[in-house]
Amino acid sequence: MTRYLLGRLAGLLGVLLVTSFVVFATVHLAPGDPVTFLLHGRPATPETVAALRAEHHLDDPVAVQYAGWLGDALRGDFGRSTQYHQDVATLLGTRLGGTFLLVGYAALLVAVGGVGLGVLAALRPGLVDRLVLIGTGIATATPSFVSAIALVSLFSVNLGWFPGPGGTPEGLADRLHHLTLPAVALATTFAGLLARVTRSAMLDELGREHVDVARARGVAGRTVVRRHVLRNGLGPVVTVGGTMLAGMLVTTSIVETAFDVPGLGSLLVQSVTAKDFAVVQAVTLLSVAVFVLVNLAVDLLAPLIDPRLSLLTHGEGTS
């Protein structure tokens, strides 16, 4: 176990190191002069431009700039935002809560809706199964921004059940009320995908020989489903669900922008537009770190969900 964890953590550090360099180099090689954004369109003398370039080390080679940024990042200093004029770490701290609450809300909807519909489709062949397949197919094919537009138009503008984009919620209950439509828009595609994965896993387990034996011995149907079908089928469901959870962090940029939610996703979009290098690098690095950590957690949970898997075998299979 210790060797396995150390190996995965070393892999995590390697992924973060490579990703951080790729993002750093890509951002700095993008077209456009960062000094233009630093000046906000104001005229400046050549001396002022030179001073700004020297202050932000823009004339240094990319490798030198990266080494300096990495050293500061290891000390918790991600630089200063040129757009918001404050430390990036402080800025991220003000946005983390909104994004994590939105992703957590959406993940709950995906887990309940996706697994529930998948189990229902597997246990009710025929009309119910076909309806679930049609519904999940539509959900899977619907982009998040289309879901956002439809939800706002129906539930906000026409029915008035939920507030529209923007607004300042007060208290947790009001905040959840404001985040309901964004969470549904974020969860729709992922719930459809998870429902199909759950249905496939359940059907696979329902055809196993030990399930037929349990039924022949007179074991109650609910007990067979709970102990022999659902639990054994949760392995691929949890694996795919963990990947979806990490993927939601990327999709939040679309949903947060559509609903004007002050989170990391909308911050990333605004920072890319303003070429705020420090914020783009920090948000991207944080997203990659969460993605790798979620996948590590899924790898550790898999043997607990399905005792047939050992940590060693699972580690060899995914390395």
Image (cartoon, grey):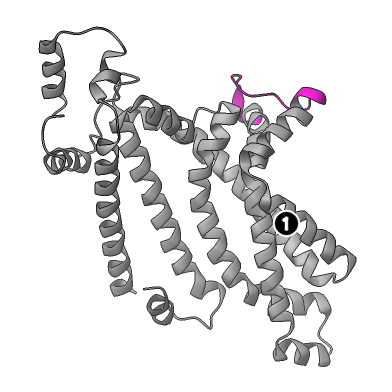
Tag 1 residue: 137
Identify the image quadrant of residue 156.
Answer: top right
Identify the image quadrant of residue 121.
Answer: bottom right
- Asked if one can make out residue 180 in the rendered structure from this viewpoint, the answer is no
Q: Which secondary structure lies at badge 1?
A: helix
Question: Residue 47: x percent and y percent?
Answer: 10, 11
- Residue 295, above or below 210: above
Camera-side residue: 35 or 164? 35
Q: Which residues are magenta?
A: 157-173
Q: Residue at x 16, y 26 (%)?
A: 56
Question: Residue 103: x percent and y percent?
Answer: 55, 43
Q: Residue at x 16, y 40 (%)?
A: 62
In the rendered structure, the answer to whether residue 229 lies left or right of residue 300 reads right
Locate the N terminus and report the quarter of the image it occupies.
bottom left
Q: Is residue 284 magenta?
A: no
Identify the image quadrant of residue 314.
Answer: bottom left
Locate the C terminus and report the quarter of the image it occupies.
bottom left
